[in-house]
């Protein structure tokens, strides 16, 4: 099996490295937990880095590499869901894209804000809605990226739009996306300059990756290799 990068993949990652250089260090005047940059986000969109999974010669594997490379930065950007999950949904959706587990409604949701696309993953379906200010409850974060809570609403079921995609494929892509953040936390990249040198940061990354993940037939959680294969197969 040839695991080396293709010329196209190398070109994408090289261009991404150049784009990311101005964001490689934490500003001296920053003392918070979640460091974000609209300039970085705009550059990623305009450069097409969040759309690489749509290209047949790049696909989900290249998208996963983009996510992993950006996870090394001290800045938090909504990349993972846009790059790996959005292409599976077959729809143009406003960003940020937030992933929520229908079976864990009280968990904080990354990058949740008014106007965000909330993708709700259930055991037998994938649905979504656009969040309004009424749907979002602000909360403090120690995770190194912005989070908020979804406000329970009796009429939410009427707001949901169902996507024609396998929940297993979305779950696999979700786990691959979060896996890049866990590797960054364990490897001492982005998070060691903000909060992730703390043990609770690695534990929170583990929790986000494993929470609600499907079990394999042997009772063990599927590894990231299995998840990546599932995400690639679900394009």
Image (cartoon, rainbow, N blue to C red):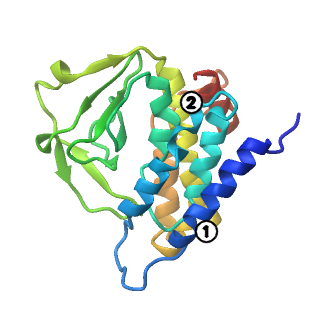
User: Which quadrant is the C terminus positioned in?
Assistant: top right
Tell me which residue sits at (27%, 41%) in the image.
Answer: 116
The correct choice, above or below, for 153 with respect to 63 in the image is: above
| The disc label shown at residue 171, or none | none
- Closer to the camera, 207 or 136? 136
Report if residue 197 is visible in the image. no
The correct choice, above or below, for 43 with respect to 166 in the image is: below
Report if residue 123 is visible in the image. yes
Residue 144 at x, y percent in the picture: 42, 63
* 205 horizontally vs 104: left or right: right
* 201 horizontally vs 140: left or right: right
Q: Secondary structure at mark 1?
A: loop
Between tags 2 and 1, which lies in front? Answer: 2
Tell me which residue sits at (64%, 22%) in the image.
Answer: 233
Q: Earlier in the sequence, mark 2 or mark 1?
A: 2
Q: Residues within 10 Å of mark 2 (few under 14, many from 20)?
A: some
Q: CA distance from mark 2 to mark 1?
A: 31 Å
Tell me which residue sits at (74%, 49%) in the image.
Answer: 10
- Closer to the camera, 204 or 158? 158
Residue 218 at x, y percent in the picture: 67, 24
| The disc label shown at residue 188, or none | 1
Tell me which residue sits at (42%, 85%) in the image.
Answer: 28
Q: In the image as oriented, which residue stretches furthest toward the front?
A: 46
- Closer to the camera, 227 or 106? 227
Q: Quadrant of residue 139?
A: bottom left
List the residue tagged with mark 2.
Answer: 54
Q: Quadrant of residue 70?
A: bottom right
Q: How many marks?
A: 2
């Amino acid at each position: 099996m040839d695991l080396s990068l293709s010329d196209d993949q190398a070109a994408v990652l090289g261009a991404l490295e150049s784009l990311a250089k101005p964001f490689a260090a934490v500003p001296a005047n920053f003392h918070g937990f979640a460091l974000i940059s609209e300039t970085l986000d705009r550059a990623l969109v305009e450069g097409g880095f969040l759309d690489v999974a749509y290209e047949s010669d790049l696909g989900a594997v290249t998208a996963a590499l983009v996510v992993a490379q950006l996870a090394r930065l001290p800045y938090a950007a909504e990349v993972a869901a846009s790059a790996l999950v959005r292409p599976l949904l077959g729809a143009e959706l406003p960003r940020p894209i937030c992933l929520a587990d229908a079976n864990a409604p009280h968990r904080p949701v990354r990058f949740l804000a008014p106007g965000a696309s909330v993708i709700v993953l259930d055991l037998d379906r994938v649905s979504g809605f656009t969040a309004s200010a009424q749907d979002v409850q602000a909360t403090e974060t120690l995770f190194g990226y912005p989070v908020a809570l979804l406000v329970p609403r009796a009429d939410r079921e009427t707001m949901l739009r169902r996507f024609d995609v396998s929940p297993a494929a979305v779950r696999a892509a979700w786990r691959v996306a979060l896996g890049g953040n866990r590797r960054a936390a364990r490897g001492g990249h982005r998070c060691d300059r903000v909060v992730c040198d703390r043990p609770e940061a690695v534990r929170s990354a583990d929790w986000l990756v494993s929470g609600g993940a499907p079990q394999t037939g042997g009772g063990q959680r599927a590894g990231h290799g299995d998840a990546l294969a599932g995400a690639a197969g679900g394009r």
